[in-house]
Image: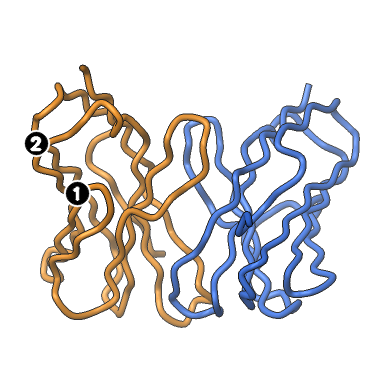
Amino acid sequence: DTAVSQTPKYLVTQMGNDKSIKCEQNLGHDTMYWYKQDSKKFLKIMFSYNNKELIINETVPNRFSPKSPDKAHLNLHINSLELGDSAVYFCASSQDGASRQQYFGPGTRLTVT
Amino acid sequence: AQSVSQHNHHVILSEAASLELGCNYSYGGTVNLFWYVQYPGQHLQLLLKYFSGDPLVKGIKGFEAEFIKSKFSFNLRKPSVQWSDTAEYFCAVNVWNQGGKLIFGQGTELSVKP
């Protein structure tokens, strides 16, 4: 009965490859988010979707493309991976796009070699 | 731009010591405030939150925080820490009408010595 799940948990890949991270929530929430946690543990929002519609698109390279097939899923596709993309990526969801509590997934640790 | 500042990068305490972690934010409008905890190798968990009402909020595991609007602060406290409180603590702010995004502080690593 995991609330927010992500796959894979670990991802090791080489520079230049394309990879995807998947996120699913079973809380019935309308809004989902992607956050990036860098090596200094600083967390920054990347994207958010509300009911499959893109709401927030922070200053993120266009190699990163979120996709929301339905409101329970928000996937993150990354093209042409670079060393600097190495980080932990967290998915989160909230009931709506207002100022509500967000529930976080377990994170995906991406290592680019 | 809104920002969140946590005063301490790394705090080391002995068990039973009292804890206070500072958090200040820069935004003059309505905000919601959160403290999240990240245990080693785990995801973020909500400790407590403030939306409105009593500025002293109580959370899980004996933590509490006080919102002082005039000081733009939301400090986290615990009267007596345990070894199991060793973790990274994040203060976060959610600004109204900005799509729900959380703006995080840089985190404070708490190490509790047994």
Chain A visual colour: blue
Q: Residue at x 60, y 44 (%)?
A: A106
Would you say B44 lies left or right of B67 here? right
Q: Chain of mark 1?
A: B
Q: Residue A84: image x %, image y %?
A: 68, 33
Are the residues flagged by discs 2 and 1 from a single subunit?
yes
Above or below for B21 versus A58? above
**In the rendered view of the protein, which quadrant contains the N terminus of chain A?**
bottom right
Return the residue found at the far front.
A1
Q: Residue at x 42, y 35 (%)?
A: B39
Which quadrant holds residue A68? bottom right
Label at residue B99: none
Q: Residue A113: image x %, image y %?
A: 78, 21
Looking at the picture, tell me which residue is in the foreground, B66 or B94: B66
Return the residue found at the far top.
B114
Q: How many marks?
A: 2
Would you say B63 lies left or right of A102 here? left
Above or below for A91 versus B50? above
Q: Residue at x 55, y 42 (%)?
A: A37
| Chain coloured orange | B
Residue tagged by mark 1?
A: B62
Label 1 neighbour load within 10 Å: few <14, some 14-19, many 20+: few
Residue tagged by mark 2?
A: B18
Residue type highlighted by circle 2: Ser
Query: Mark 2 near mark 1, Cβ–Cβ under 8 Å?
Result: no
Q: CA distance from mark 2 to mark 1?
A: 11 Å
Q: At numbered mark 1, what does the secondary structure look like: helix, strand or loop?
A: helix
Q: Residue at x 18, y 60 (%)?
A: B73
Q: At numbered mark 2, what does the secondary structure look like: helix, strand or loop?
A: loop
